[in-house]
Image (cartoon, coloured by chain):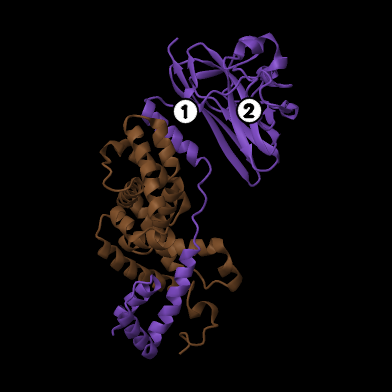
Chain colours: A purple, B brown
Amino acid sequence: MKCTKARELLSDRHNGEISPRAAAGLRRHLKGCEACREATGELEEMLQMLGSWSSPALPDGFDEAVHERLSAQGQGQSLEAAPASAVSRPMWSSVVRGGGLVAAGAAAVLLIVWVTSTSNSTPAPATRILCPAPGHAKRATTMAPGIGVAARPPDSARRLRVGQVAVLVLSIRAEARQSDARLLVVLPDGVTLVGEGARDLEEKRMEWTASLDRGVNEIRVPVRARRVGTWRLVARARASGFRTVSETRLVVTRS
Amino acid sequence: MGRERASAEAHWAALVNQAQQGDVEAFERLAKEHYQTVYAFSVGLSGDPTEAADIAQESLIKAFRKLGSYRFAASFRSWLLQVTRNTFRDRMRSHLQQRYKLRRLAERTVPLSPANPEQALAAKQTSAQVESALSRLEPQFREVVVLFDLQGFAYREIAEICGVPMGTVKSRLRRGRDGLRRLLVADGVIGSRRSGDDDSGRSR
């Protein structure tokens, strides 16, 4: 047997695809060929290495980048994020802080479009409500679901007409408590942020630090539908060793 | 494997149907289930995680654009990896070719020094060494080794992805493994030169 043939058989043997006769021939060859014996050890070592190879994790932002590009293709609309801008006057955050929308008064009432009957809802774990603005993060409150707060419609059915206002809920799930998580919410072009008195605000990008509880953490974002299209709101949370993205899709139709 | 695989394929086929009717979300769900596979394949092909992210992204977008031409001849996963393979090949051919060549040349001129045992044990480095050696293997062998030994695909699926008969896959795997073994030995990653603890080795 030639060495080249023996090398092929070594590979086959590793895969368990060798006939008894070929295996016997290979054994005979190996007995008399030091180079092939050496190659056998190297091959096994290599295959063990290949077997323990693991792909690096998907890079940050991969999901979103693909999503952006797909959405642009699919809708003929670009879902580009607005340029970063500091949240200078987070007035709108008052709408969502302190126990959710209930406490926010008349302005909040205007905002709730997805109120459902919550009395018969099944008990769910308490949900942490986060306020998407700097300086208010500490006021995140824990409340049971269904205290008159906008309920989440099924994912596929988030529809609004142009001009309508709604509170979008972005859920961030954490497997363990995360203190000092960096949160980022980005609004697409087709919707604007709504503040106190149902006023439109300019902020498109909100970044702040908050702690996340284990389980579901919700970020509530009051928005007004501005332009027809399918739009996406993204919330990102990041802490050391923790990273997650949540998104909500919104279909805006003609008024 | 059979039943699980079949139900996965049926599930993908249903999503493909929806996506072919213009449901972008269905395509995204479909794509998401394959992100890691596409990315791992891209890393294996390019030997560069950053480059791989570009390749993977481009492949997914291309797949979306070309979805209308997918006729269920192969499983969706095979088809998607075909697209990934072609994307990689196109890039190799294009202006990036120079960069790949340069990098490989650099790797050849400065071979990885025989790693000390602790370093060799570091999984991360091992992966990098494997990826580096792979990137110097000829593409037609490289893709088969990546799919079979790194990603665990079956011959049938590799044949679909690479568009060659199963017999060709098998022979490329043999040659690819042997080529890769030589590269890793030359790099001092495997074999007696690495550790010196193998008396029957090259000490002569």
Give the chain letter at badge 1: A
The CA span between labels 2 and 1 is 38 Å
* Disc number for residue B177: none
User: Who comes first in sequence, dot 2 or dot 1?
Assistant: 1
Give the x, y percent position of residue B19.
35, 33
Q: Secondary structure at mark 2?
A: loop
Q: Nearer the viewer, residue A229 or A215?
A: A215
- For disc 2, the neighbor class at 10 Å (few under 14, some 14 to 19, many from 20) is few
Q: Marks 2 and 1: which is nearer the front?
A: 2
Q: Is residue A215 left or right of residue A156?
A: right
Q: Name the residue located 36 percent from the left edge and 73 percent from the top edge.
A: A11
User: Could you tell me if residue B187 is visible in this image?
Assistant: no
Q: Name the residue located 29 percent from the left edge and 68 percent from the top edge.
A: B171
Q: Is residue B60 left or right of residue A115?
A: left
- Residue highlighted by disc 1: A80
Q: Quadrant of residue A168?
A: top right
Instruction: Check the image and name the residue furthest to the front.
Output: A120
Give the chain letter at badge 2: A
- Residue highlighted by disc 2: A122
Q: Secondary structure at mark 1?
A: loop
